[in-house]
Image (cartoon, helix red, strand yellow):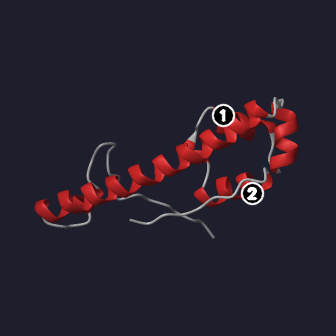
């Protein structure tokens, strides 16, 4: 049995996937703006959590290897946290790491 995967359309970088899905230009622009806002808000949350983890590592004067053991992740993942590579982490995983440090994360919705 042969398997054929054929992409019929790829949205270019910077393109609007909503336009490509057939939404009207006005609706596609609205949906894209809403999507970008949500993504931006999530990135701010991730960066904030990563900053807290980085500060904890500095305050405890931990080497990345030692921090990795405490956080339950690999040493390269600690480097990713310190360098704020947000796309590599979920908010949930960052909250879990902070819990392992003894810190408590509170959520505020406005």
Furthest residue toward bottom: 1
Label placed on residue 82: 1
The structure residue drawn at horizontal position 81% and vertical position 32%, both measured from the top left corner, is 64
In percent of width and height, residue 27 lies at: 16, 65
Left or right: where does residue 15 sit relative to residue 72? left
Say if residue 62 shows up in the picture.
yes
Count up the numbered dots: 2
Q: Nearer the viewer, residue 26 or 40?
A: 40
Q: Is residue 8 above or below residue 50?
A: below
**Marks 1 and 2, how far apart in space?**
17 Å
Q: Nearer the viewer, residue 34 or 51?
A: 51
In percent of width and height, residue 71 lies at: 80, 48
Say if residue 9 shows up in the picture.
no
Q: Nearer the viewer, residue 87 or 64?
A: 64
Question: Disc 1 on helix, strand or loop?
Answer: helix
The structure residue drawn at horizontal position 60% and vertical position 47%, both measured from the top left corner, is 49
Image quadrant containing the N terminus:
bottom right
Label placed on residue 46: none
Residue position marked by numbered label 2 in the rendering: 99
In percent of width and height, residue 33 lies at: 25, 55
In percent of width and height, residue 73 lies at: 80, 47
């Amino acid at each position: 049995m042969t398997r054929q995967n054929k992409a019929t359309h790829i949205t270019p970088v910077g393109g609007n996937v909503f336009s490509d899905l057939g939404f009207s230009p006005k609706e596609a622009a609205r949906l894209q703006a809403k999507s970008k806002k949500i993504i931006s808000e999530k990135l701010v949350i991730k960066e904030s959590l990563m900053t807290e983890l980085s500060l904890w590592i500095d305050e405890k004067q931990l080497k990345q290897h030692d921090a990795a053991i405490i956080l339950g992740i690999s040493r390269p993942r600690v480097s990713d946290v310190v360098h704020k590579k947000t796309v590599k982490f979920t908010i949930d995983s960052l909250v879990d790491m902070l819990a392992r440090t003894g810190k408590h994360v509170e959520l505020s919705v406005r």
